[in-house]
Amino acid sequence: MTSQAIAEQPMPKKTEPQKYSGKPILTMTGVRGGYGDADILQGVDMQVTEQEIVVIVGPNGAGKSTAMKAIFGLLKVRGGSIVVNGTDIAGWKPNRIVQHGVCYVPQVNNIFREMTIHENLEMGAFLRKGDISESLERVYTLFPDLKERRNALAGNLSGGQRQMVAMGRALMLNPSLLLLDEPTAGLSPKYMEQIFEITRNLRDAGLSILLVEQHAKQALAFADKGYVLAAGSNRHEGTGQELLADREVAEMFLGG
Amino acid sequence: MPFMEFVNFYLMPGIVLGSIYALGAVGITLVFGILRFAHLAHGDLATLGAFAALGVVTIFGVSPWVALPAAMVFCAFMAIGIDKLFYDYLSERPKIIVVMSSLGIALMLRAIVQVVWGVDTETYTRGIVRPDDYWGIRIRDREIYTIIAMFVIVGVLWAFLQKTKWGKAMRAMSDNPDLALLSGVDNRKITMLTWGIVGMLCAASGFFLGINTELKPLMGWTMLLPMFAAAILGGVGRVEGAVIGGLIVGIAEETSVLFIPGEYKAAMAFAILLLILLVRPTGLLKGKVL
């Protein structure tokens, strides 16, 4: 596509949620909050519907990871609502949110280094009672590399495999919404592609995924929807293709 | 010096003392790994456990071996209670405040022992036990039981940590507390469970020191430094490391008499602690960095 063609694309307006027809899993409305007294999020609106990959992109310090932590109850939410599966979870503690079907994979320190892969997955299912073998089997099918090395200490794995352990741990509770905070940070292109591939497979299997991603172009290419955050509030939104085609978004946030 | 003399008078007593240190060091390493502070009341909790067993022996007239489990249960509840009253109350404050409060707890526990049992030296049983001879190794029954009991208690703990859901949750909390909380592990339950186990280990180490020597209100306090040396030597947070560390410190103390005057025996733990902190601060088995 020439730059002329990009310029002729209509500016995407704030698109209305009804454009995405599925059942809403997560709806954030006017969320404000931060770690200390200052608000980092200045009113964030976001929606993730059933079986959808939503990517949050934006410059450093825009509040991408902060928005994700707000959903998971890791910072003070001072305004707005965060509705997951019909219930407002703003202000809940993380362990209650986990039970409500939301699982979160932090960007760093996201595995138990001194425990085996298998034990990491078992810890993911800590809140579940009864048999977990089916979930274990499902995770091992998604990540065959992990099954081979199930008794290896997670701390001894490569970066890509650690990320798989971290995602596998989060999937053990069969969440309806998965939050991934920069899952490909510091990974080789091969592993990045593999993580993206798994993310798409999870979506196709029925999961809703909210993704914060530095590799914005690659992620928007397969995302169902994207939000551009800047300075703690919404700047743009649209389907992945729309955002990629938007000249302003491209210049400001995707590196031209 | 003949080899058997070395084994009988230096090595075996070292292993017995090391087993006692190991029981205490495992508790210290658990508190360090999971609750992340240096528990200075550890020795005096062991004293309380030893005297609690003495109380059971004098009141019910039973064998000290029957009193051991009772003392372990008693100390488990004491440790959980102390945590509820003091450490938990301070848990949001800087760790150094919790450490200093544990020093206060140590003095309180010692005072309780002195008020209830007096300041005199006590024993579980009277009379002198002669060591038996096993193929040239001279060892008393109670010494054999001490070594076996240490390995059994630590073995049960190890299996609990490796195989059970809550044991794994304890390891997870030690490994990555934030992620453990994100996985839905209840911090409060893990803390109580840890103190229960630590209380039992304390009582056992105090009891075995008491049965192999005698009971004094200061018995646990004097064990504190060697137990810390053992925990750090083995690698903080590593149960198997604490056992190895305990045995090394115990054997080093007993064999040091061959080279230095006996009065300086207690300095061995200090020397080991200093050396390990200078040379390999993560300990033999790569524990947490202090």
Image (cartoon, grey):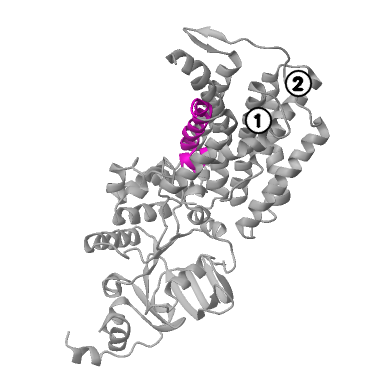
Decide: is A18 above or below A171.
Answer: below
Q: Is residue B76 visible?
A: no
Q: Pick the residue in front: B278 or A131.
A: B278
Give the residue at mark 2. Answer: B57
How packed mark 2 is, by other alpha carbons closer than 10 Å (few <14, some 14-19, many 20 or more), is some
Say if mark 2 contacts mark 1, CB within 8 Å. no
Q: Earlier in the sequence, mark 2 or mark 1?
A: 2
| Residue kind at label 2, given as amino acid type | Val
> What is the number of the mark on residue B109?
none
- Tell me what residue is drawn at x 62 percent, y 56 percent: B96
Q: Pick the residue in front: A38 or A174.
A: A38
Dominant secondary structure (helix, strand or loop) of the stretch shown in magenta: helix
| Residue kind at label 1, given as amino acid type | Gly
Q: Residue furthest left?
A: A2
The magenta span reads: B230-259
Label 1's element? Answer: helix
Q: Is residue B134 visible?
A: yes
